[in-house]
Image: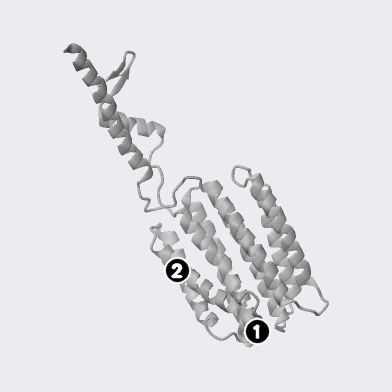
Amino acid sequence: MQQKHIGKKIIHVPNRVLLVLTAITTLFFCTEVSANASAKDVHEMADICMQANRILKDYALVGMGVSYHDPAKDLKENLELIENEIKDLEGHKQNEKIAAEIEEIKKSWHAIKPEFEKTPDKSKMSDLRKMVEKFTVRCEEVAEDIAQDTGIEGEHDVVLVAELGMESQRLAALYLMKAWGIADSDYETELQQIVDQTEKIYKELFEADEKLVSQEIKERLKKVEKEFIAFSVMAKSDSGRFMPSAAEKMASKIFEELREILEMEQKLVEGTVSGYFTPIADEKTAGEIFRAITGIVHTKGGIKS
């Protein structure tokens, strides 16, 4: 009888421990964060920054009557995409500062969006580009604020990769404006600013710790950098000949490759961290919670209940 009693007790303790471990695991990984932004928030805001200049590029292509890649369809789909991403961001829980910044971005975008829904007008292109420039500058700042608020190391690099996508479309839009015959005396200066900013971003990513930007990602970035340089050389040409379809082909190729790299970067820095959940305690605190709930203490002889 004594033997059976001992056996029963041995079974009882592990079962109790198992239940508590399950509870702690739930606390660790299923506690909703109400104050901090999520990784998904970073992704969506960064994508909004990228898509705004892409829409501007497609606006110019439609205006010129270029049908390559069906820019009218892309423009419509990306307008819907930005709208959905803004709505999704509003539905998440963030702190007051981030929530206010998202509201600011929404209002700014809704001031621009109606123009993109109209038939492209050559006379409005310059003013529209200035509006997008101002919007994307602020958009980048908000994306960085969200990245910092997540507390996830490496989210800054996620935003940097997204900025490369944005700059590639910005270059395309500027070139296509010139191809459309829209005079801009600052074209060369603005073009060089894009090139300089892009080089600065690439340099920072190449010098980043490999745990945040892997060697594989860096190799992929080097390949895209060469494609961007080739694109910028074409944009700088003063031959007087313009190739809008070729520009669209190059810009889209760079953009899609950077979207793939962006996904790789997101997976690297976020790992298995959920965009909505985060641990609530460190290892020491977890142990204290465990002992408090179970009433179990460790002795030299083993476990005492």
For this view, does 252 lie left or right of residue 80? right
User: Which sits in the foreground, 219 or 96?
Assistant: 219
Question: Where's the N terminus, which quadrant?
Answer: top left
Crowd class of label 2 (few under 14; some 14 to 19; many from 20; radius 10 Å): few
Image quadrant assignment for residue 3:
top left
Residue 36, above or below 279: below
From the top left corner, tell me how far across and down residue 203 is, in percent: 70, 52
From the top left corner, tell me how far across and down residue 91 is, in percent: 38, 63
Image quadrant assignment for residue 281:
top left
For this view, does 118 lie left or right of residue 28? right
From the top left corner, tell me how far across and down residue 122 is, in percent: 64, 86
Mark 2 → mark 1, Cα distance in angstroms: 28 Å
- Could you tell me which residue is drawn at 39 percent across and 53 percent down? 35
Question: Judging from the image, what secondary structure is the residue with disc 1 in?
Answer: loop
Q: What residue is shown with label 2?
A: 84
- Could you tell me which residue is drawn at 49 percent across and 69 percent down? 81
Crowd class of label 1 (few under 14; some 14 to 19; many from 20; radius 10 Å): few
Q: Which mark is residue 57?
A: none
User: Which sits in the foreground, 15 or 25?
Assistant: 15
- Tag count: 2
Q: Is residue 160 visible?
A: no
Q: Is residue 73 visible?
A: yes
Image quadrant assignment for residue 244:
bottom right
Q: What residue is shown with label 1?
A: 65
From the top left corner, tell me how far across and down residue 195 is, in percent: 72, 64
User: Which sits in the foreground, 155 or 247?
Assistant: 247
